[in-house]
Image (tube, helix red, strand yellow):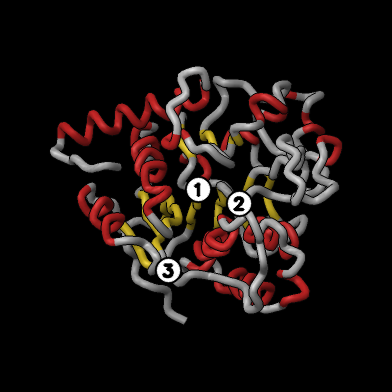
Amino acid sequence: MTASVRTVDSPKVWTTLLTNTKYLPGLLALEYSLRRAGTKYPFLVLYTSTLEPEGHAALDRRGIAKKEIPYLLPKVHKEYGVEVRFYDCWSKLQPFNLTEYERVVQLDSDMVVLQNMDELMEMELNNTDRVFAASHACTCNPFKKPHYPKDWIPENCSFTHQHSDPDAAQLEGAPTNTGLAICNGGLQVVHPSKETYDKIVAAMSEPTMTDNYEFADQSLLSDVFRDSWVPLSYKYNALKTLRDIHKPIWHDDEVKNVHYILTPKPWEVKDESNELFNWWWKINDERHTVEKETGVYDSF
């Protein structure tokens, strides 16, 4: 099969998924933060047919490249109840199919980059024992959500296992088989490959597998590629909750990319008492200033 034509003229690219305008303010802050951090690689929005016209207009107004992708779902419907966000998450697996690129780093739109992390574009990956790279998921369930698995407790969290050696935690993640051995899907360093994508599609076509994937894309990746992914340091996908519940390893000056998981999102509330939210607002305010200087005005 011939690879698709590249939407952006680069063998390596940052991508993010956009299914509706709810996350658009976060996406725009993310795109600006990557440029602000001095990346030499382009940014590409992967959008689905559900994106509203005003979302397209906002991207076009800013000259942000975009590519339509199919909305990906398991063959048999998987019910997520209150976690409706997980229906969109399956489509975050589409970068594995972007074989026109040598490297894709997929980022969630509720992230903001604080330091250059272009090194992720250069790390070694393959189709066997280094299929993709990601940080671990935090399985502490700090908000005690009743529908989360019962084994999601601090004792089973990979980050807890790093508390005794915080210096090492700045350099690499815990081994893939640590704790519950689950990656977080917010940042995925991907070597696109038909072979890998076919394995993903095969798993999504098997109800006995997808019925057990409580966290959609990251559950699938952790299962299908168990022990075949590269664990990254938390600093590349610094979940906002880690700053409080994993204080021994969180170092403000080391964090490269903050992930504002769960609600509320920074753009939904301006809480000056929340230092992590202030980081986001500082960058977003800069973005607005720069955009106004170039004549870009809209509600996003």
Of the numbered discs 3 and 2, the one sitting upstream in the chain is 3
For mark 1, give the secondary structure.
loop
Residue depicted at 63% across the width and 60% down the height: 217
Residue depicted at 74% across the width and 69% down the height: 211
Residue depicted at 41% across the width and 53% down the height: 13
Q: Which mark is residue 69?
A: 3
Residue bearing the label numbered 1: 108
Residue bearing the label numbered 2: 185
Q: Are marks 2 and 1 in contact (CB under 8 Å)?
A: yes
* Mark 3–mark 1 distance (CA, rounded to whole Å): 16 Å
Residue depicted at 61% across the width and 36% down the height: 239
Q: Name the spot of residue 106 as percent of width and height, x first.
A: 50, 52
Classify residue 200 as left or right of residue 50: right
Which amino acid type is marked by label 2?
Answer: Gly
* Mark 2–mark 1 distance (CA, rounded to whole Å): 8 Å
Neighbor class of circle 1 (other Cα within 10 Å; few <14, some 14-19, many 20+) is: many
Q: Nearer the viewer, residue 182 or 151?
A: 151
Classify residue 35 as left or right of residue 148: left
Which amino acid type is marked by label 1?
Answer: Asp
| Location of residue 7 by image quarter | bottom left
